Amino acid sequence: MSRFWSAVTHGLTPYVPGEQPKLANLVKLNTNENPYPPSPKVLEAIAKATNDTLRLYPDPNSDALRAAIAVFHGVTADQVFVGNGSDEVLAHTFLGLLKHDRPILFPDISYSFYPVYCGLYQIAHREIPLAEDFSLRVDDYLNTPNGTPNGGIIFPNPNAPTGRALAVSEVERLLAGNPDSVVVVDEAYGDFCAESAVALIQQYPQLLVVRTLSKAHSLAGLRVGYALGQAGLIEGLNRVKDSFNSYPLDRLAQAGATACMQDRAYLEATLGQVIASRERLTAGLTALGFLVLPSGANFVFARHLDHDGAALTAALRARSILVRHFKQPARIAPFLRISVGTDPECVRLLQALREICG
């Protein structure tokens, strides 16, 4: 703490990322990274781009990457915005598209960066409780107290850390009920789910879908995220970006990400492996006495009916196995968020839990 901090800095409660320890023989299932390597075409593209052109600034608009993303999703390039990870894309969205004179809405159990952005940009917000089964109830976002309009809506789909997915038909009902509010669907884990809200973009001018290459595409280390929406929303994001950092993606990131988006076959193969492992992990945990929520992501959210979540986390860590535990809010404290690893990693996790739980 310093006396030179601004009032805003004093008032911030920063986001706490998942632990990145350097331990030997570690099974790391705490940060939802993909257990498989990126496409070989990505590595080839990065190697090819590693030359004397690094002395030059990168393309500020990432035109080649935006074009590749547009083809991948069946949209136009002017409907694509790219940034330094989806967190930067979300930050620009909070600043540039969500209203600051009315509270924005998001679930009470959700991505914990959302309230951090509200604090950073001094945006009022209201947390809407999930249902008892941790599902999102669209009706709760259609009726505001005293008829007061909201300043926007944001939620992950599938949700984090629960993994529960909202059907696209329900997303559309939410959009139809909020025609004057920007609705941000954060699809960081959307590739692991059967449905995407991208199909609704042409019909709903207030819809922004945010995605990342960190999860399904195995590129967490490259830091590339993007948003899809009608051109008016994308123009607003570009205005914010060019008022903050005109060069968010370096040459290597652009080259690797472009190659990634052009290798759909590799993505589909990796997705198949992760989803199959997720189902086997769910079955194994259930057999050990865990309640496992339905997951559309590359992680599961589970609690043991007889063992405390914090105690299980500590016992696993003692065996060099990391999972994520959230103390708040209280109703998720019994749960563990477990990233889907390789099958050998999942087997090691299940063996450890069998020893711990008896």
Image (cartoon, rainbow, N blue to C red):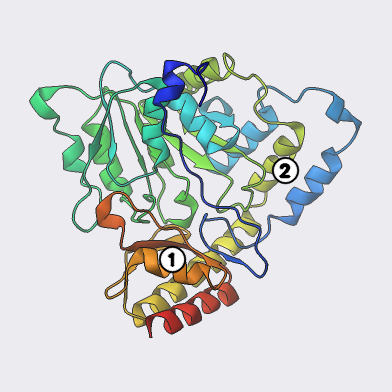
Q: Marks 1 and 2: in contact by CB < 8 Å?
A: no
Residue 326 vertical position relative to residue 213 in the rendered view, above or below: below
Other-residue count near label 1 (Cα within 10 Å), few / some / many at <14 / 14–19 / ≥20: some
The percent coordinates of residue 159 (x first, y second) are 36, 49
Q: Residue at x 85, y 42 (%)?
A: 48
Q: Residue at x 39, y 63 (%)?
A: 336
The percent coordinates of residue 120 (x first, y second) are 42, 24
Q: Nearer the viewer, residue 273 or 173?
A: 273
Q: Nearer the viewer, residue 183 or 67?
A: 183
The percent coordinates of residue 84 (x first, y second) are 60, 33
Give the side of residue 62 with respect to residue 79, left or right: right
Q: Nearer the viewer, residue 288 or 220?
A: 288
The percent coordinates of residue 222 (x first, y second) are 67, 43
Residue 246 vertical position relative to residue 209 in the rendered view, above or below: above
Mark 2, secondary structure of its residue? helix
Q: Residue at x 48, y 22 (%)?
A: 231
Circle 2: residue type: Gly
Q: Is residue 208 visible?
A: yes
Mark 1, secondary structure of its residue? helix
Residue 76 vertical position relative to residue 69 in the rendered view, above or below: above
Q: To which residue does mark 1 refer?
A: 313
Q: To which residue does mark 2 refer?
A: 256
